Amino acid sequence: MAKTPLESLSAVTTSTLRPRILSLVRVRLSSCRIRSASSMEDRKSMYKELGLFSVKKKIDDVIYRAEMIAPVAVELEEERRIKQEESLCRCNLWNSDITISNESLITLADAIKMVNDLKDVQHKAEEAKLITQLAQIDLVNHKLFEEAYNASLDVNRFLDYYEMSKLLTGPYDKEGACMTITAGLEGIASEMWTEKLMFMYTKWAENHSCNVTVLEKLPSDGYGIKSATIEFEKKYMYGYLSGERGIHKMINDSLDKSIVLETCSASIDVIPLFLENTVDLDIDDREIETCFPPSNSKTAVCIHHIPTKTTVQCSSERSQFANKTKALNRLKAKLVIMALDEGLHTSRNKHGAETRRYNLRPKKSVQDVRTGIVTPELYSVLNGNIEPFIRAHINLRRVRNVGYINHI
């Protein structure tokens, strides 16, 4: 049967246009994919540029801070070094007391090291500044830009350390620190909380390039630990950590705060760890009692000071003699701090006073009882970011000590 002219035209049109239509659809789809891919690339590029801008802003802030502080600090420390050298030239070290001679040499070495460190900070800041300037005209890669950012972090960390060291002017603030964390009476919950605090302080020390050693750790019968003794072997650690003394509570309230579901605590004590000098204190043998408590270590020694009812213990060494020597040094350090606190009438945290509250519910937060500082960054704090609290304690202690001196 013959096709009508309309049917023939329809067949021809369909057979001719279908490939063209399909080709056009493919082209359209391909162009859509290209536009989509290019828009994704543009978006990634935009995010990358925003990230680089944020990083550059942080680097610029650190560079500005270094340019403001470092030159003045270098000048002051150079004057300190020159005065110390002149003082050593005027006196005869061979005829002087050995202790005085050692202190003079240590002071000079500290001044020289501080000058060198500050000059190194200036050099790092200048390098970071040059890299950020070259980055604006795309002459450096992102790897080098990342190195500049890491250098700025080192510069900022050292400037923080330098500024805080100038505020730490107490008799023993320059010493290392020995911290003892003891679980409260709430059972396994407190023992787990004690282990969490031990991690927090060791993490903080590692972030500050401090040599930290967990000397003694008494394990729990279940989870956690009953107590731990940690040594921080770096200058100014006692000045930094002395404000951490006291009771640290973890609180878990109900959603409407009407019921306290769980509270566990741990007590923290901090004494100086004398890195270069020994404690100048004589203790009458009749005022102490020595015993050998049962523990995992057969060489553990416990010393009780009868007049002050102070007890210290050591079990980290291999012999009872070494543990007794170390325990006696800890007792002396504890007694000199007790005498200092009583003499200055300071309100530094006593061993049994509440220091900080860590709230898990209904809102995660950390509240410092003495300074009033509150932060919602609970997990950040437990991960070792306790710098705001340490700074606040140092400033508070400095203000109160100045107030006491003015009152006198």
Image: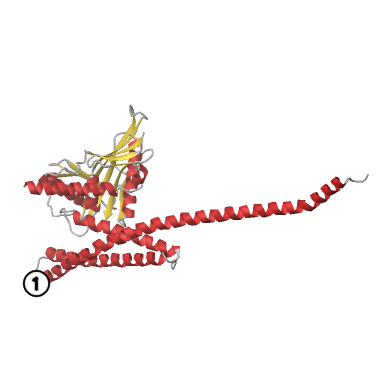
Residue 243 percent across, percent down from the top left: 22, 46
Task: Sort mark 1 into few (<14), some (14-19) or many (20+) by Cα contacts within 10 Å.
Answer: few
Label 1: which secondary element? helix
Task: Describe residue 33's horizontal placement relative to residue 205 as left or right.
Answer: right
- Name above or below for residue 79 compared with residue 156: below
Specify whether residue 142 is in view: yes
Specify whether residue 321 is in view: no
In this view, which residue lies farthest toward the right?
A: 1
Residue 264 percent across, percent down from the top left: 31, 35
Amino acid, disc 1:
Arg
In this view, which residue lies farthest toward the top?
A: 258
Residue 251 percent across, percent down from the top left: 32, 35
Judging by the rendered image, the residue that carries numbered circle 1 is: 90
Closer to the camera, 129 or 385?
A: 129
Residue 63 percent across, percent down from the top left: 31, 62
- The quadrant where residue 158 appears: bottom left
Closer to the camera, 364 or 67?
A: 67
Task: Describe residue 7's horizontal placement relative to residue 74 as left or right.
Answer: right
In this view, which residue lies farthest toward the left?
A: 408
At 25% from the left and 67% from the top, the residue drawn is 116
Task: Describe residue 100's horizontal placement relative to residue 193 as left or right.
Answer: left
At 12% from the left and 64% from the top, the residue drawn is 100
Closer to the camera, 22 or 251?
A: 22
Closer to the camera, 12 or 297?
A: 12
At 79% from the left and 53% from the top, the residue drawn is 16
Q: How is the image coloured?
A: secondary structure
- Name above or below for residue 95 compared with residue 25: below
